Structure formats: C-alpha cells, structure tokens
Image (tube, helix red, strand yellow):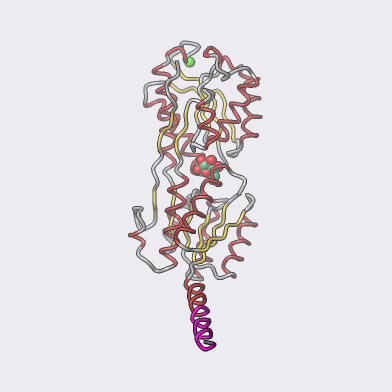
C-alpha cells in the first residue's frame, strides 16, 4: 500500500515537473495599462494564453520607455521564452530587438509598429497590428457618406467640409496615417476638406475634451461641420465638449458628426444614443489572439504557419479594420 502511494506520489511529482518545464512563459510589455483600447487587447491576450495553457505576465510601462526597458530586462532575467512588446516609443524598438536577439528570444511587437529595417534586423522579430491607413480611409468615408446623405450638414453651403482634427500621440503610425488618410478619403469622395484646427490629444478623452472646448470657443460650434478623432476616447472627449455647448444632445439642428476609431463599448453606446456618427472597428480580439498564438508557436518552435492567421513577408500579421455605424440619421 505504502509502495503504491510512493510510486504514485513520484509519478504525480514527475508530471508536475515536466508540465512546469514545458510551460511557455510569455512576457508582455504594454505601453500603458490605462488605455481603453489596450485593455481590450490585454484581455484578449490573457484569454488566449489561458486557452493555450501558456503563462502570460503583463507589465505596465506607464508611458515611459525607461520604465518599460527595465521591465523587459526583468522578464529576460525571469527566463521568459518569448516577448510581446507594445513599445512606448516605437522608434526606440531597435535596442529591444538587439537585446532579444542577443538572448535568442523571439519578440512580437503589437499596436505600435517598429520601422521595417528594425524588424528586418532579427529573423525572430514580428509585428501584429492593423493597417493605419485603412482606418483613416474608413473614418473619412464615414464623414463623406454622411454628407452625401445629409446635404444640410454643409452648414455654410460652400460645398466644402469644415472639420477639426484630434490627433493621437506624436509619432504613432495611427496618428500620422489616420490623420492623413481620413482627409484624403473626404477628398476622394468629391468633397473639399477644410481643416479649421487640429491638435494632439494623446489618445486621451480628457485632453480631447479640453481641446475641443477651446476649439468651440475660438471657432464657434455653428462653424464646425465635422470632428475627426484618431480614436474613440478622443471622439468621446470631443462629444462631452459639444454637449457642454448643447450640441449632439438629440436636436438635429445642433448636431456635428463625430467619428473615431476602435469601436470601444463606450463609443458604441454614444452611437446608440445618437451622439456619435460612427467608428472603425480596431479588432483588439483578433490582434491579441494572433499575437499570443504567434508568440506561443515561436517559443515552442512550432509551425507559425499553422496558427490561423496569415503571416506576410515572414514578419507581419495584419488584422483588417471595419466601419461601424448605427442605423440612419434622420
Ligand atoms: C488605438 C488607440 C490607442 C493606441 C495605443 C491605437 O491603435 O486606436 O485607441 O490609444 O492604439 O497605442
Ligand atoms: Ca461647408
């Protein structure tokens, strides 16, 4: 009896040890936890890691590249098998890649795209994200489509669209390309875009609200025909400011179409209430799942072609964007 007990005990111990030895450890560095979109992203990654039986640890870079660099060192010292990096400053990715390469640790970048030459400097460096220009184009199309359906949206009847632009963090590919392509799409739809004002609000709702307050005061809400925000949080901040001016509260004569990007729950809610025109789905779920599956396969020396997402140029997984609107404005 005792012998059987001992044997089974040894067997159980052996099992747990092998399980621990085989378990993939993922170290995931997020630029800032306090970001509504990155929260969706984090949840998707945690869920997928649990499904795959991988261990994932997440760190909050608190929007400081130095803090993040220390967290990367700590993960490496901890013996993680693979890194997922959402860099604070995507242009500071080269030292991160060099460090990972020196230790032969694969690294999957997410959401903030390193320059191609950086990614190309290490065969185990990848990027999972969405094409920024696509989201810009789709956001601009939402505005143009609204003006086609609602000619009275051209309040000063000059055939042009007078807009204000709220931009994300400086240097972020989504800030640069969404700004550029949303205006481009308005042009391509046959309207002349006129930028009344633009400012960086760092993806942040409060900053956007303050900036929009200043814009409405300087320009007059009656002279603003559209608000283009690089993400939903800033769109919602702008809407707060408009509501303070008795705009976007349900009266069609006091309404300015506002578009964002992400399709966060709070934006969908604002759209349901008729406060916000539309958004573009930034698919955090699929980006998170793809990043974790890729990281897991890389760490396990598995087949990265079998993870269910197409890898282009041996480097990139691109998750498509999608326009989102709610019903028709009357
Ligand atoms: C999202 C923003 C987010 C940013 C963080 C963008 O893709 O649209 O909402 O703040 O990524 O890097
Ligand atoms: Ca006009």
| Numbered marks: total | 0
User: Which image quadrant: the C terminus?
Assistant: top left
Q: Quadrant of residue 202?
A: top right
Q: Is residue 313 magenta?
A: no
Secondary structure mostly seen in the magenta stretch: helix
Residue located at (56% from left, 46% from top): 39
Residue located at (47% from left, 20% from top): 161
Percent from the top left, x then y, of residue 114?
48, 52
Q: Which residues are magenta?
A: 2-13
Q: In the rendered image of this protein, does residue 276 appear above or below residue 75?
A: above
Q: In the rendered image of this protein, does residue 295 appear above or below residue 198?
A: below
Q: Quadrant of residue 254?
A: top right
Residue located at (47% from left, 32% from top): 279
* Residue 309 located left or right of residue 274: left
Percent from the top left, x then y, of residue 113?
48, 50
Question: Farthest residue in the front direction?
Answer: 1
Q: Is residue 8 magenta?
A: yes
* Residue 122 located left or right of residue 255: left
Q: Quadrant of residue 132?
A: top left
Percent from the top left, x then y, of residue 301?
39, 69
Residue located at (65% from left, 34% from top): 206
Percent from the top left, x then y, of residue 282?
46, 41
């Amino acid at each position: 009896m005792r012998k059987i007990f001992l044997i089974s005990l040894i067997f159980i111990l052996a099992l747990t040890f092998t399980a621990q030895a085989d378990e993939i450890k993922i170290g995931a560095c997020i630029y800032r936890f306090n970001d509504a979109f990155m929260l969706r992203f984090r949840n998707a990654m945690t869920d997928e890691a649990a499904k795959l039986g991988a261990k994932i640890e997440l760190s909050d870079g608190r929007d400081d590249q130095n803090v993040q660099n220390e967290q990367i060192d700590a993960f490496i010292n901890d013996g993680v098998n693979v890194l997922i990096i959402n860099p604070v400053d995507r242009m500071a990715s080269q030292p991160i890649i060099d460090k990972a390469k020196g230790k032969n640790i694969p690294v999957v970048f997410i959401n903030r795209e390193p320059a191609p030459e950086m990614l190309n400097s290490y065969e185990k460096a990848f990027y999972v994200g969405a094409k920024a220009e696509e989201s810009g184009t789709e956001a601009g199309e939402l505005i143009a489509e609204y003006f086609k359906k609602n000619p009275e949206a051209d309040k000063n009847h000059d055939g042009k669209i007078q807009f204000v632009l709220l931009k994300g963090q400086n240097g972020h590919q989504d800030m640069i390309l969404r700004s550029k392509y949303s205006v481009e799409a308005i042009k391509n739809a046959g309207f002349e875009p006129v930028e009344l004002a633009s400012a960086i609000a760092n993806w942040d709702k409060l900053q956007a609200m303050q900036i929009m307050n200043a814009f409405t005061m300087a320009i007059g809400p009656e002279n603003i025909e559209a608000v283009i925000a690089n993400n939903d949080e800033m769109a919602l901040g702008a809407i707060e400011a408009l509501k303070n001016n008795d705009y976007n509260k349900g009266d069609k004569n006091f309404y300015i179409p506002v578009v964002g990007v992400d399709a966060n729950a709070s934006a969908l809610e604002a759209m349901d209430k008729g406060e916000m025109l539309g958004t573009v789905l930034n698919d955090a779920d699929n980006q998170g799942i793809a990043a974790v599956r890729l990281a897991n396969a890389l760490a396990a020396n598995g087949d990265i072609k079998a993870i269910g997402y197409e890898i282009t140029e041996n480097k990139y997984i691109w998750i498509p964007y999608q326009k989102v609107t709610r019903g028709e404005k009357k």
